[in-house]
């Protein structure tokens, strides 16, 4: 390796985490926890929840959920729009019927 692209790939693709790195992270998290901890909070800081999914998969799931909710809102708005249109058409037809009666 010449220290170019190959070394960057090694850093990015690193999936092994040593016990020392984990302890260092716990220490830092615990120190930060002590700074913000309230008296009613537990002594130990809560453990991080480990999610084995890749970032891409997690972001894709969030995107899919967002699209689903947007589609639901679109449908609700379409139904509301149709309700308003039918009310308007009913009102116009009633008005025309009154005009015809008066004639």
Image (cartoon, rainbow, N blue to C red):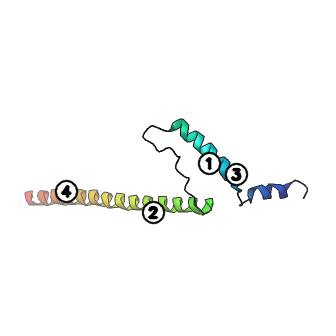
Cβ atoms under marks 4 and 3 closer than 8 Å: no
Q: Residues within 10 Å of mark 4 (few under 14, many from 20)?
A: few
The residue carrying mark 4 is 91
Mark positioned earlier in the residue sequence (2 or 3): 3
Q: Residues within 10 Å of mark 1 (few under 14, many from 20)?
A: some
N-terminal label among 2 and 4: 2
Question: Residue 54 appears at what percent x and percent y?
Answer: 62, 62
Q: Nearer the viewer, residue 9 or 28?
A: 28
Q: Are marks 2 and 3 in contact (CB under 8 Å)?
A: no
Q: Residue at x 53, y 62 (%)?
A: 61
CA distance separating discs 2 and 4? 35 Å
Q: Secondary structure at mark 4?
A: helix
Q: Dot 3 corresponds to which residue?
A: 21
N-terminal label among 3 and 1:
3
Q: Nearer the viewer, residue 9 or 41?
A: 41
Mark positioned earlier in the residue sequence (1 or 4): 1
The residue nearer to you, when weighing 101 against 20, is 20
Determine which of the numbered discs, if any, sits on residue 38 in the image: none
Residue 66: % across, % down = 48, 58
For image coordinates 51% across by 63% down, the residue present is 64
Quarter of the picture holding the N terminus? bottom right
Describe the element under mark 3 as helix, strand or loop.
Answer: helix
Which residue is denoted by mark 1 in the rendering?
Answer: 26
For disc 2, the marked residue is 68
Closer mark to the observer between disc 1 and disc 4 = 1
Q: How many marks?
A: 4
The residue positioned farthest toward the front in the image shown? 43
């Amino acid at each position: 390796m010449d220290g170019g692209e190959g070394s960057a790939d090694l850093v990015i693709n690193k999936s092994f985490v040593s016990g020392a790195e984990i302890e260092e992270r716990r220490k830092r998290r615990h120190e930060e926890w002590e700074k913000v901890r309230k008296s009613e909070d537990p002594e130990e800081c809560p453990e991080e929840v480990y999610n084995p999914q890749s970032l891409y998969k997690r972001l894709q799931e969030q995107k899919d959920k967002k699209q689903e909710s947007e589609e639901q809102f679109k449908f609700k708005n379409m139904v509301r729009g149709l309700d308003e249109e039918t009310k308007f058409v009913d009102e116009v037809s009633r008005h025309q019927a009154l005009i015809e009666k008066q004639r």
